[in-house]
Amino acid sequence: MSGLPNGPFQRGRLNRNVDTLNERVPRKCVQFHVGILRQQIVEVVNAFRRFQDVRLRKSLQDFRDELLAAHVDKDFLAEIAAEYAKGRLLLIGTTNLDARRPNIWNIGAIASSGDPGAVALVRKILIASAAIPAAFPPVMIDVEVDGKKYQEMHVDGGALRQVFLYPIRLEFGRESQEKGMGRDRTAYVIRNARLDPDWAATQRQTLKIASRAISALIASQGVGDLYRVYLTTRRDGIDFNLAFIPAEFNLVPKEDFDPEYMKPLFELGRRDMLEGKAWHKSPPGFDESDLAPLAPK
C-alpha cells in the first residue's frame, strides 16, 4: 500500500463503515493497520493540515519529530505488541542505500522486544520509510555486527520496492508442507495508484523532463513489483487479490489533502467493496489462464 494523496482509496476499501477507520498515518506513505480509533486518525490528519502554516516558521524535521513524539510512544508499541502476540505481522520497508538492498522490518518483534530503544528505533524506521531521496534527508540507523558498531543509511522503501508482501526467501508453501501446517492463505494487495499509462504533455525543460521520466520509472516499477508479488503467491499457493485505482477515475488533486479529490476516491473504494467488485485475481495485462495450477498449500 502507498499513501497520500491516494490513501483514501485504500481506506474506502478497508472501511465499509465511513465512521470506522482502522489506520494510523504518521507521515505520507506510511500506513498500517493496528485497530486504532478514528479520533486518533483525525488528530494526525489535522496535524498535517496545520503543516501548511507551520512550515513557514518551523523546519520540516522539527514538525516531523513533534508529530512522531505525539503518536508513536510506548503505549502505541504496546498495541502493536498485543496484535503481534495474536499472530499478526506489521512489516515496514526501507531501502539500505549503502547495500542497495530492501530492508523489511518486523515492527511487532521490535515492539515486543522490551528493548529500551524500541520506540526510538520504530520512529527512525517510520521516518526512513517516507524519506524520499533528495527530497528528505536519509536516516542513519545504528547496527551491530560481530561485536562491531556501524551506521546504515536508510531512505524510502519505494526506492527499490513500490509494493511488497513478505520476503521472497520465505517459501510459505514448501515450509508449511514440511511442517504439516498447510492451510488456506489469502493475500490482499492494494496499490493506491492507477496502473494505466497517463498521457501528459511534457515541457522541454530539463527538470520537467527528468520529473516525467522518474514518474514513468516509478509507475513501471510498481507494476513490476505487483508481478513479483503475484508470482510469489502462486509459488506458495496463496490466493492473490489486487485492487488499484481504475482508469475511469480521472480527477487530479489541486493540493495536498484536497477534499474534492480525496472524498470521491474514498467513496470509490468503499462503493467497490459494498458492490462486491473489489478484487482482481492477477496483475493488469496478465492472463491467469495461461499458468499452471496453484502450487500445493
Image: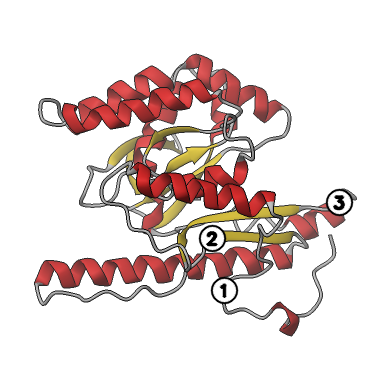
Q: Are discs 1 and 2 less than 8 Å apart at CB?
A: yes
Q: Decide which of tag 1 and tag 2 comes sooner along the chain.
A: 2
186 lies left or right of 6 = right
Q: On residue 284, which mark appears? A: 1
Q: Label 1 to label 3, Cα distance in Å?
A: 27 Å
Secondary structure under badge 2?
Answer: strand
- Tell me which residue sits at (60%, 63%) in the image: 229
Q: Nearer the viewer, residue 22 or 207?
A: 22
Q: Decide which of tag 1 and tag 3 comes sooner along the chain.
A: 3
Q: Specify whether residue 239 is in view.
A: yes
> Furthest residue to the bottom?
290
Q: Position of residue 253 (x, y in %)?
A: 31, 52
Q: On residue 183, which mark appears? A: 3
Callout 3 crowding tier (Cα within 10 Å): few <14, some 14–19, many ≥20: few
Q: Are discs 1 and 3 less than 8 Å apart at CB?
A: no
24 lies left or right of 240 = left
Question: In which image quadrant can residue 111 be found?
Answer: top right
Residue at mark 2: 244
Q: Position of residue 60 (x, y in %)?
A: 20, 33
Q: Label 1 to label 2, Cα distance in Å?
A: 10 Å
Q: Nearer the viewer, residue 51 or 240?
A: 51
Q: On residue 74, which mark appears? A: none
Q: Position of residue 124 (x, y in %)?
A: 37, 32
- Tell me which residue sits at (21%, 66%) in the image: 211
Q: Position of residue 118 (x, y in %)?
A: 47, 23
